[in-house]
Each structure stands twice: as C-alpha cells, then as structure tokens.
Image (spheres, rainbow, N blue to C red):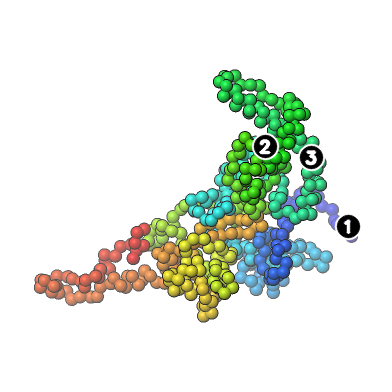
Amino acid sequence: MAGRGVSPGAALLRSSRMFSMPAPIPAPPGDYSSATKHYSPTATINYPTHLTVTTTSSSRINGDWGFKRPFPLKTTTNTTYPLVRVRQVDSTEHVTDFQSASDHTITLQKYQELNLPISVPMQTGYNPLMQTSVFEESGDVTALNAEQKAELANKRWKFTGPWLAGMTDGDFNRFLEKEVRGKRSEFRAFLRENLAAEMTADQAQKAREAGETAEPPAISASDVTDEEFMDYIRELRQDRMALYSLVGRFLDLAPVDLDTEYRKVGTMAPDKPRVLDRGSPYGADGPPITHPSAGLSYLRTRNFQENHAIYGPQKHHPPVKARVLKPTHFKTGSFRPSIGVAGFVVNPVVKDTMFNALKGWRPSRFVKALHEIELEERGGSKLYVQPTMASVDSFGRICISIDEANPQSEVVQKEMVGEEKVFEQVVKEIETPEVPRNPMNASGSPGFSAPLGQRRLGNWRDGNARNYGF
C-alpha cells in the first residue's frame, strides 16, 4: 500500500533534527587477532553507535517516550535511569526495537565527574610537562592549504588518505587500484613542481653565498627539462625518506612510524641533509576515527584548584575510588594489576609507585588489595587513585592513566564522602575537660590551666593549605 502523501512543510519537519533521529554510525571494527579469545556478547562496545533517548518520570509511567507507540512498562520501568537506544523505530512486525542505553550514558557522566581533559597520545611514558590538549590550535585544525598540510603533518589528526599500516592486504590492493593507479600523470606533475621549487631554492642559496643582492628568477615546472626530471626520479628511488614524504603529501596519507632501518644514512641520498622531526602521536596506532576528544570533555587543562568548605583551597585534586579488577599474580606472569575507574580499565603509570609488583615496603592495605583477592570485601578490593591523563586511541577506546593518591587528599576525600569522621575525631581530641574555677596551677597561684599538650576548643581555627585543618 502506497504511503500517504505529506505537504512540503511536513516533509521538512520529518527530516529535521527535531523530529528525526540521526542514522547510527558504524560499529567499531573487531580485533582479528582475538578470534580465539572469549569475549562476552553483552560487553559494552568501545563507543556508542545510536542516539540515547530519555523521558520524564511522569511520561515514563505511561510508556510515553515520544514515539508513535508506547513502550512496554515491564521493560522500561525496571531500570534505575530512563535511558534507551532505539535500533529501529518501525520494524516489519510493527514494533519498536530498543534496548537500555545506561552503559554508555552513565559512563559519560562518570567520566565528566573526573574533570579530566582529553590529551594528545604520548609516544613514550607519561610526562605531565609534555601533556598537550587536543584543542590546541597547532593540532586542532582541519581547513588547511597544501603548505599547511605538509607543515602540520606530524600534529594534525584529520587526513584525506588512509593509514596504510592498519590496512589489510585486500584493502591495500583495492586502494591501489581505485585511488592510486589513476593518478600517475597528476603525481608526475606534482613531482615537477616540487623539483622546480627545489631548483629555485638552490639557486637562491648559491646567489646568497656568492654575495649577490638580486634574487634569481624563479623556475617554473615548465622550465624543467625531461632529462632533469628523469635524473630527479632516479635520485628519489634511492632516497626513501624523500620519496615517502612526497607520496604522503600527494595522497595526504596519515603518517606511519618508520623502523630504524629506514632512518639510517644508507636510505638517504648523499649530500642531502634531512630534518628528522618528532613523529606524529598517531603514527604508532593510527589517527582517530573522530575528533581526538570524542565529545567526552571540552576542558583544555586541569590547572585549577579545588576549594574545600573547611580546609580551603586544595593542592591536589580529589582522588577517585577505584576497583581492583585483577590483582598481581606472579605465577601467571601478570606483574601489573588491572584497575577500573569510572567504568574504564585504566593504565597505571610506569614508574616507582605502589602499582609495581616488587614494592613490598608499601602499606599493607595496598599490598593486600593489589596482590590478593579480598573475598570479604563487598564489590571487591578498592583503593583511592589519582587520574592524571586521558586520551582516545584510533579504535575509539578511552585510555586513562592513574597515579598514587596523595595521602592527605585521600583523608580529606574520605571525610567528604562519609567514610571517616576525621574532623569530629580531631575536635574531640582537642577538647579540654572541665576544671574548677580558680584552681591552683603548678606555681601555686590561682588561675586557669589545662593539661600539657591540649588546646581549648575556643582556640580551634579552620585549616589552611598547609596543615589541612589537622
């Protein structure tokens, strides 16, 4: 049966963002190397693919979610938060295919409570001084000309071409057939222009060395002879560094970290100095599939102070309670524990911290939580950690780094959440017992005195950034 026609205004409203849902994005690619490993079919995927829909409490009781038919109350009212993702609005069975979306939505809320900005992935270990936000103007640019693309090749994240190191053999062959082979003449013209630019720069350098004041005329691509061009191609075949750079500029390929053998002098032409810049942060694992922030956080820095109601400005950010998912086990070769923070499996920093396996001098509570499975603890072993850095890899996974929590900050945070009544204990300790009026002090004269080492409650002052009020 043919659909009923609608007016142009109704058709416009139906296709607008106010009355329509965006198309789902592709699911994250699978790991080909994990075909023999067991993964739960209900595990949360790396990133959400569908829009999350919510409703008010009054509408939720009636099954009203803003769609053409109400949702069943038995399914939508047995969850804590009214969050669903709709896979298909109207299926062939005339039902709406939906499921709970609390996994990604609550994870987003928990991450935003960390107040942790997204940083550019680091090539080496964690260094807070080299931490760079993904919103810096040097790397967060997309509208570039040819010169800017070549200059910012190791900083930008968006490329027209693919990342060759992440392609399979079949994808690479199809890329050669469809995208590369038909651009032979364009690439030769690009090489001619590059050769003309190099010849112009060489002539200008020779003129400056000879002491000439006038600049020589620029050489155009049409002035390059066929013999000069063929000699230039033969030189490029022996200079892999220059050839890879030109091919990457022409196809706008994402950078790839080169092996050590390609950085040797034998791979470069003699008397041709090359400037080996620091590699791209996305050269090892590939550029991200979306913006490097992934829309998780729009903070550029974490350089702000937390203000406590009693203790004043804090030196450190509040630590976060983490769960030990897998403790250290020497027999299986697992020397680093797996720790979960805000719904993510985090990476402890590689340095002298309590997370290292051979730190026996650490407090017993840390050793037991990181090296043993505490079955008597509800929900498993827990400890306080300090998040330091977060980044998004090329597969859309969120990588969070953690460090040890400051002891004083941990005590203040435990008091804040009600785990320890630190302030009340301190006040009780400094209270002085009642003494009779006009007692005799140690010198034999009447006066007020208190036992040594005790302070009156009236002398209590709120803490500062140095003593945290203790």
Mark 3 element type:
helix
The mark tally for this picture is 3
- Give the CA separation, mark 1 to mark 3: 47 Å
The amino acid sitting under disc 1 is Ala
Tell me if 104 is positioned left or right of 192 in this view.
left
Q: Can you identify the residue that label 3 sits on?
A: 183
Q: Quadrant of the C terminus?
A: bottom left
> Are dots 1 and 3 in contact, CB under 8 Å?
no
> Crowdedness of circle 2 by 10 Å Cα count: few (<14), some, many (20+)?
few
Judge whether residue 124 can be spotted in this image. yes
Q: Earlier in the sequence, mark 1 or mark 3?
A: 1
Identify which residue is drawn at 83% across, 65% down.
92
Between label 1 and label 2, give the one nearer the viewer.
Answer: 2
The kind of secondary structure element at disc 2 is helix
Q: Which residue of the protein is positioned furthest toward the left in this rendering? A: 444
Which amino acid does the dot numbered 3 rest on? Lys
Q: Measuring 66% from the left and 57% from the top, which residue is drawn there?
A: 395
In front here: 155 or 408? 155
Q: Position of residue 427 (x, y in %)?
A: 32, 70
Q: Percent from the top left, x then y, of residue 384?
A: 48, 67
User: Mark 1 to mark 2: distance in Å?
Assistant: 51 Å
N-terminal of the two: label 2 or label 3?
A: 2
Q: Secondary structure at mark 1?
A: loop
Whole-percent x, y for residue 320 in the image: 50, 65
